[in-house]
Image (cartoon, helix red, strand yellow):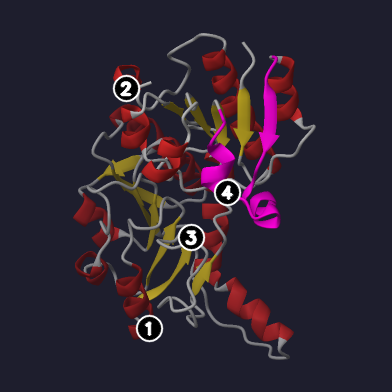
Amino acid sequence: MSARVLVTTAYLEPGGEVDRLLTDAGHEVVFARAADRKAGGQSLVEAIADADAVVAGTDKFTAEVISAATRLRVFGRCGVGFDNIDVAAATEAGVAVTYTPGVNRESVAELVLGQLVNGARLLPQNIAAVREGRWDQPSGTELAGSVLGIVGLGSIGKAVARVARALGMTVIAYDPYFDADFAGDHGVERGTLDAVLQAADFLTLHLFLDESTRNLIDGDRIAAMKPGAFIVNTARGGVLDEAALADAVRSGHLRGAALDVLETEPLAADSPLRGLDRVFVTAHIGAATHQARARSSLMAAGQVADFLAGNPRPGNLVNPDYLKGAR
């Protein structure tokens, strides 16, 4: 049966592979990305009203938005996180939610590597200085021999660990579901959260955001870190207390930080991170490679197509209890 599939993922284009995959399956595909809606003055509530399925990007699908979608049956989220979708509201409404884990592992790991080098050698500041006519040669630090702390040893954390070990770094990791076999095979030490924070010259975060991880790295934990440590966050804004981070960088306790995710995106005008030249903020680009985006969007669209073809439990289903929902 033909369905109306709404595509809100910003980087997907009409006529592309996702469009063809869904059209070939007999569905009507409608693109209503944020930029498109802004141009037409259409809200997300209006866009989703007559959709049977959504290939979703980073729009906030709140309970209010979901309640407006009286025909909606499935979300296919392009990405490894799905905190922009109110899963509880979707489940109550009988709407399945899928996501695409693992697709951006290498892309994010490579961004982390780049930011580790930036933190070790302060490349952005040096590039800016040369552009301004100065010829500064500050002493950096080598990654080889330094300690990398990893909080969250999942798919991406493991990819970062492999790269770090290849560079000669000592790696110590914390994860409540620690993979001892991987750690043994790759020379990764196991530590408690506090032990990892206290040992790390460089710290990288790779964990989901929920109420158990919100502000997990808070002022007290930052204060307990090594003086001169550097933090990289490519996980989720909200796991790191940004005000406490800004204070620690401003005081000189931390060498700096690189953040690809923020509690409020884009970076707010009144953010405490503004004006700090040792905090490198990027615009949530961890998965922004051609390869990762192709893998993610095709997986999400494939899951949506599978669901619409009659499979009530497509791959990477977040909320199997949706079957008990209202629709």
Secondary structure of the residue carrying tag 4 is helix
Whether pointer 4 and pointer 1 mark residues with C-beta atoms closer than 8 Å, the reply is no
- Find the distance from the CA under tag 2 to the CA under tag 1: 49 Å
Secondary structure of the residue carrying tag 1 is helix
- Find the distance from the CA under tag 3 to the CA under tag 2: 51 Å
- According to the picture, the residue beneath numbered tag 1 turns out to be 250
- According to the picture, the residue beneath numbered tag 2 turns out to be 325
Secondary structure of the residue carrying tag 2 is loop
Number of marks drawn: 4
- According to the picture, the residue beneath numbered tag 4 turns out to be 110
Whether pointer 3 and pointer 2 mark residues with C-beta atoms closer than 8 Å, the reply is no
User: Which of labels 3 and 4 is toward the front?
Assistant: 4
Q: Nearer the viewer, residue 215 or 186?
A: 215
Q: Is residue 40 inside the magenta stretch?
A: yes
Task: Specify which label sits upstream in the sequence, 3 or 4.
Answer: 4
The image quarter containing residue 303 is top right
Task: Specify which label sits upstream in the sequence, 4 or 2.
Answer: 4
How would you rate the neighbour count of disc 3 (Cα within 10 Å): few for under 14, some for 14-19, many for 20 or more?
many
Indicate the amino acid at tag 3. Answer: Leu
Q: Is residue 129 inside the magenta stretch?
A: no
Q: In this view, does 129 lie to the left or right of 206?
A: right
Q: Would residue 58 be visible to someone looking at this image?
A: no
How would you rate the neighbour count of disc 2 (Cα within 10 Å): few for under 14, some for 14-19, many for 20 or more?
some
The image quarter containing residue 180 is top left
Indicate the amino acid at tag 1. Answer: Arg
Residue at (66% x, 45% y) in the render: 289
User: Height in image: 238 above or below 127?
Assistant: above
- Find the distance from the CA under tag 4 to the CA under tag 2: 40 Å
Q: Residue 283 in the image: state x and y as whole percent.
A: 57, 60
User: Which of labels 4 and 2 is toward the front?
Assistant: 2
